[in-house]
Structures are given as C-alpha cells and as structure tokens.
Image (cartoon, rainbow, N blue to C red):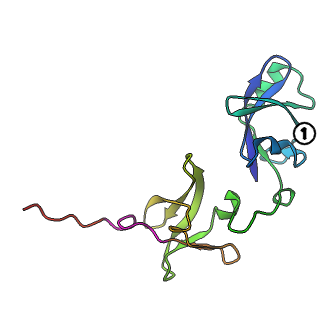
Amino acid sequence: MCVGVIVGAHGVHGAVRVKSFTADPADIARYGPLEDEAAERRLRLRVVGNAKGVLIAKIAGVADRDRAAELRGMRLYLSRAALPPPADDEYYHADLIGLAAVLADGTPVGRVRAVYDFGAGDTLDIARADGPPFMVPFTRAVVPEVDLAAGRLVIDPPPGLLTPVEKEAAP
C-alpha cells in the first residue's frame, strides 16, 4: 500500500520532504522499513520535523542534497500486513479500489478506480464501461453497503448522476 511520497530534498545534509498518507502523518516511519514501487529498495525513515504539510525525514545512506533530490517522486510502500486493521466501517483506500459498484437492485454501474480526499471527505471515482466516469461522495447515504468479501459496494447515486435530469420545456 502506498503510504507516502518523497516530494523533494530539504537542506544540504540529505533530508527529504515526505508527503504522508497515513492518518497520523508521523506514523509513516512507525511501521518499519518502506519500499519503492518495484520493491527493489528498502528505506528506513526517521522523522526529524515537519514543514508546510510535509514531514522532514532522514534516510539511512542519504547524506547530501544531491542524493536526496534523486529520490524526488519516489512513492513509499508498506505491505498490507504491516498496517493495523481498520476499525468497523473504515476502509483503506487500496481495499476500495477495484470493487464493483452496483445499484441496490444489483445493476452494475462500474468499478472504483480511485479514492480522493479533496478536504471534505473521501470521494469515489467510478469508471463505467458504457459511459464517462463519475464521482460520488463516500458517505453512508450514497454508499450504504461495502462488501469486501464479495468485491462490491452498493451506491445510491443522487438523482440525475447516471441519467440526465429531464428539463422542463420552456413556455
């Protein structure tokens, strides 16, 4: 699971700026060594501070700005087993991505392709086979059921989201 990304170098002594995706940003270093996307590099982060929405961290073996700058854009991953289990009615974004989205009567409408948080709560981005993608808020009112074991979630989309709202004719 992607838990963060290195967004740049910080200072001249090899520190990096890290955007953490964990609930408590500093927890990114608590779960153990992180890996790059290809699982070829293992990195142990030590958080040394924070600045403007990012963490400042040191990485073993990275001692100068040039080496730190080379890591910019590297996504940081943990195995799913290293993370604590979510509480009831909580889900990791990675668990939602790929789920089939169906209506209450079982009619398929698409598949969750991404989960975003624009600041007002999570939003599901759902791809459709026969139409443009659409987004719905990940709330109990709009997504009343999530069944990870069955690989699906039920959505109750707002009126007009999946079909155009008919316009009244002008007099």
86 shown above or below 69? below
Q: Which residues are magenta?
A: 156-164
Q: Nearer the viewer, residue 71 or 116?
A: 116
76 within the magenta span: no
Residue at (51%, 71%) from the top-left corner? 155
Residue at (85%, 60%) from the top-left corner? 81
- In this image, 153 relative to 4: left or right? left
Residue at (46%, 59%) from the top-left corner? 134
Q: Quadrant of residue 111?
A: bottom right
Q: Is residue 131 visible?
A: yes
161 within the magenta span: yes
Q: Position of residue 110 (x, y in %)?
A: 51, 68
**SS at mark 1 in the image:** loop
Q: Position of residue 28 (x, y in %)?
A: 81, 44
Quadrant of the rendering where the C terminus is positioned? bottom left
Q: Is residue 40 visible?
A: no
Q: Quadrant of residue 149?
A: bottom right
- In this image, 115 relative to 75: left or right? left
Q: What main secondary structure does the magenta stretch of the protein show?
A: loop
Quadrant of the rendering where the N terminus is positioned? bottom right
Q: Give the farthest residue toward the left.
A: 171
Q: Position of residue 55 (x, y in %)?
A: 76, 33
Write down the residue under mark 1. 44
Residue at (86%, 19%) from the top-left corner? 13
